[in-house]
Amino acid sequence: MKTTARLSFLAAAMVTLVAATPAAHADGDHRARAIAMMKQDFVTKGQATADRISEDGLQAICNRTGNKPPAYIAQRLEADQLAGVKLPADGKLLGDWKSGEKIAQSGRGFTWSDNPGLPVGGNCYNCHQIAPKETSFGTVGPTLFQFGKLRGNTAETQKYVYSKIYNAKSYNLCSEMPRFGHIGALKEQQIKDLVALLLDPESPVNK
Amino acid sequence: MKYRIAFVAMLALVMQPASAQNKQATAKTGAKPPAAAPAEQKDAATLEFEKFRTQMEQEGNPAELFEVKGEEFWKAKRGPKNVSLAESCDLGLGIGVVKGAYVQMPRYFADAGKVMDAERRIVWCMVEKQGFKFNDLAKEPFAKGNYTPEQTSLVTYVAGQSKDMKIAVPLKDPHVKDVYEIGKETVAYRAGPYDFSCNTCHGADGKRIRMQNLPNITTAKGSLTAVLGWPGYRMTGGVMLTPQWRMGDCFRQQRFPQPKYASDTITALLTYMTANANGQMYKGLGIKR
């Protein structure tokens, strides 16, 4: 909680900073009106509450810089996002790649038509190529086929992959990828299983 | 009725779970998938559907049934004021003029003081000219099961009357340009639990979600792809759906809350996308998977 509070404060300060500098992508007037318009035009449906229209600090930075914040801001805030990543207390990051594959397949969660009582999926195949057997994969993100084979299954890589899934913005502030752990979408064990899917030498990803 | 039967057969093919389709594909090729992801790739079901759609478009699009109904609604005296839209509603080209009106919307309507897309304008006319209550029209605004809202049929009729005409959103009108610019900001706006904006999926060329190709709505070519085929008859559920519905379903998948019916936000998005497709041909009512 402390981290989150600090994070919001920092982000708020940064927004002020960005706002003060005329950015190349900015059309402040139309953006302000677009935001005001959306705040009026959206209503709660199911679990998708109306307050989702409000930006958090990080979204505000990305929205105001066309997803290209100045490096000095990006570095500060990425470090802050990384500081909020909660690594497993038992220090074990590699779970079960088989259940990781199931989590990667599921695109469930957070829409107004999803049952909020059910576990949320990783949405991974929506955007990434992963295991070779699944040929129905998206291309919004890079291919992850042979990820572990290429990068190795070291403690450091495990920590990187866990943190990246927990909060993708830790390494790339305006990454298109959701912050699955940060927003509480994926639980610790689910993230461990996804780490295994990418890094376990036995996973089909690395065969 | 014969449509129904053809659809059910087609649905059996198209609606197989992705995993089953993949098994087929893998079994056929028997090859290892490539390490690099090709941008424009279509699975067997997509190709099969596209073939089917071409055939349906030639033999008769089921959307035409709603077009006929919409024409009846347009011409009949209706509502508490017992007036027809044909004798009271101006879609931008003069009272009652329908030919070519759809491809020139969204546009600014001085009597309403607002830029409006086709569906919103039709609803405005139904309320202001015929005396229907907006809240009644907004209660269940999109088709569901056997129910099709009257305004959906009306939009279908009006859109059909612009078939094979060039898209010409009047961007020179400062009111329209202003809403266009707001729309441009709206598609870039990231929020919600997943930090998604429209552009997350629709802001670059050659992207896919699973096997679904995503049009890049920031380009003329991609915008046209997004505009074409709406309003459209959707085989899943067998319902006639409008561009307003389509925008709402995008927001659902973006993990946003629900946009109000006939709101400024939807008009802004449709203004941005349709104007980006200006100068290109609108091919009429669509068939959707």
Image: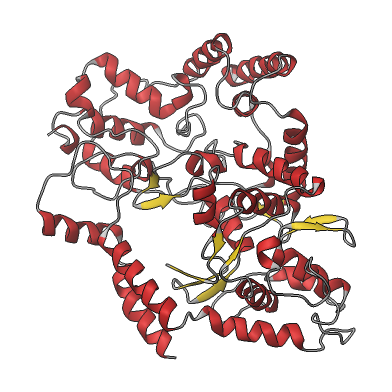
The residue at 72%/19% (across/down) is A19
On screen, residue B245 above or below B30: below
Looking at the image, the residue that sits furthest to the left is B30
On screen, residue A28 above or below B106: above
Looking at the image, the residue that sits furthest to the top is A72
Res B212 seen here? yes
Quadrant of the image for the N terminus of chain B?
A: bottom left
Residue A37 in percent (x, y) is at: 76, 44
Left or right, A16 with respect to A201, comes to: right
Q: How many marks?
A: 0
Instruction: Indicate how the structure is coloured in the image.
Output: secondary structure
The residue at 87%/77% (across/down) is B131
Left or right, A149 with respect to B151, comes to: left
Between residues B243 and A97, which one lies in front from this camera angle?
B243
Residue B209 in percent (x, y) is at: 39, 47
Between residues A149 and B55, which one lies in front from this camera angle?
B55
Q: Quadrant of residue B147?
A: bottom right
Residue A106 in percent (x, y) is at: 36, 48
Left or right, B194 with respect to A96, comes to: right
Looking at the image, the residue that sits furthest to the bottom is B1
Residue B205 in percent (x, y) is at: 43, 41
The residue at 55%/53% (across/down) is B250
Q: Quadrant of residue B80?
A: bottom right
Res A167 seen here? no
Between residues B71 and B289, which one lies in front from this camera angle?
B71
Q: Quadrant of residue B152?
A: bottom right
Between residues B8 and A162, which one lies in front from this camera angle?
B8
On screen, residue A41 above or below B191: below
On screen, residue A179 above or below B234: above
Left or right, A196 with respect to A165, comes to: left
